[in-house]
Amino acid sequence: MEKIKVLIIGSGPAGYTAAIYASRAALSPVLYEGMEPGGQLTTTTLVENYPGFAEGVDANSLMDQMKRQAQRFGADVRRGAIVSIDLGSRPFHATDERGNELEAETVIIATGATARYLGLPSEKKFRGLGVSACATCDGFFYRGKDVAVVGGGDSACEEATYLAGLCRKVYMIVRRDVFRASKAMQDRVFATPNIEILWNCNTQEVLGDASGVTGARLLRKDGEVFDIKVDGFFLGIGHHPNSELFSKWVETDENGYIVTEGKTSQTCVPGVFAAGDVQDARYRQAVTAAASGCRAALDVEKFLLENR
Ligand code: NDP
């Protein structure tokens, strides 16, 4: 059985930042990349809001730089996923997908979240060509254009108001005749003149051509089918935190996000820390994930010192 000080699970900005800090603290972290090396960011193209890149940076090369930065200080970055883990007692036991077993003094969970999509083939076809699940990442490309946002929760309302500041018109496609969002968010939407809410509507098809998205075909509850013309089609129907593997051990909220203590990354299991989108339903930015990865590594360092 391989014995290690820190096991980091996940390879988004949170995981790699934790690995950079932990390796520089001589903790020899082992990081498993998981199913989606580089994390959610790799589903976008150009990242323009990560500080330090005046002209923006390609998402894949940003993640590659983070990985190489962690490796430069000795982080052991491994392909594949952790498929089972026992957080019942320290040291913790984990098994990877090749059957290798590890004994870890501490664990940083940085498995991220996955945006929900409607599941339409046309939506998949135009992903990255007008279909996006991140208004803050991609909204800038639709300045002065018309876009649609699907969903009626806080995320959708937040995306719609953000996009309304950039775009000419924003359609909100809401499947019921009420929002799920908090009253404050709803009020913000109602007070934004260039948002038009299409109540009781479901998307049948994302429309497009070789240049990308051109519109959407909607079905209203009363049976009417109609098209809207948009250049961007944004999903705001929620995210799914990748916390299943750990939910038997660590506390999660009603949406599955791992609960951490105060401003720290400490979960309810001493020695187990969580960073990035798996514990953050609110900010979900690469830079906030990276910051929480830093916090998790510092928390691990302190924990190991105090529990020698
Ligand atoms: P929610 O689950 O709260 O809302 C999802 C929305 O998408 C609902 O309106 C839902 O409709 C709709 N939806 C779901 N599936 C479909 C589908 N297949 N087709 C059409 N519409 C669909 O997710 P959010 O991401 O908005 O929020 C998650 C959590 O994060 C919440 O607790 C929220 O409060 C929090 N949050 C807080 C923010 C803040 O405070 N600034 C910002 C963003 C999120 P229906 O209502 O009919 O189920």
Image (spheres, helix red, strand yellow):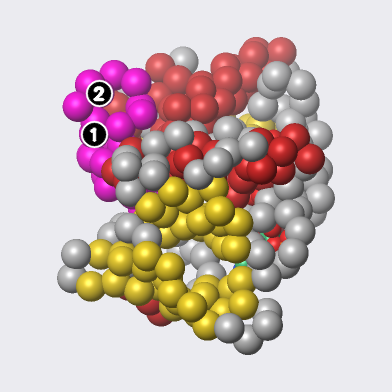
Residue 120 is situated, as x and y percent measured from the top left of the image, at: 46, 77
The residue lying at 79 percent from left, 45 percent from top is 253
Residue 185 is situated, as x and y percent measured from the top left of the image, at: 70, 38
Please tell me in which quadrant of the rendered image residue 219 appears: bottom right
Quick one: SS at disc 2? loop
The residue lying at 72 percent from left, 67 percent from top is 176
Residue 15 is situated, as x and y percent measured from the top left of the image, at: 48, 36
Looking at the image, the residue that sits furthest to the bottom is: 223
Residue 57's label in the rendered image is 1
Relative vertical location of residue 123 with respect to residue 244 in this rendering, above or below: below
The residue lying at 48 percent from left, 40 percent from top is 164
Please tell me in which quadrant of the rendered image residue 87 appears: top right
Relative vertical location of residue 63 with respect to residue 94 in this rendering, above or below: above
Residue 117 is situated, as x and y percent measured from the top left of the image, at: 52, 65
Relative vertical location of residue 297 with respect to residue 173 in this rendering, above or below: above
Please give left or right for residue 177 compared with residue 73 in the image: right
Is the residue marked by circle 2 packed among few (<14), some (14-19), or many (20+) residues within 10 Å?
Answer: few
Quick one: SS at disc 1? strand
Residue labelled 2 has its Cβ within 8 Å of some atom of ligand 1:
no
The residue lying at 61 percent from left, 71 percent from top is 201
Residues under labels 1 and 2: Cα distance?
6 Å
Along the line of sight, the residue nearer the viewer: 194 or 70: 194
Give the amino acid type for the residue marked by disc 2 in the picture.
Phe
Instruction: Kindly identify which residue carries mark 2.
Output: 53
Label 1–label 2 contact, CB within 8 A = yes
Please give left or right for residue 205 compared with residue 308 in the image: left
Please tell me in which quadrant of the rendered image residue 130 appears: bottom left
Residue 6's label in the rendered image is none
Along the line of sight, the residue nearer the viewer: 267 or 229: 229
Residue range of the region highlighted in magenta in the rendering: 40-65
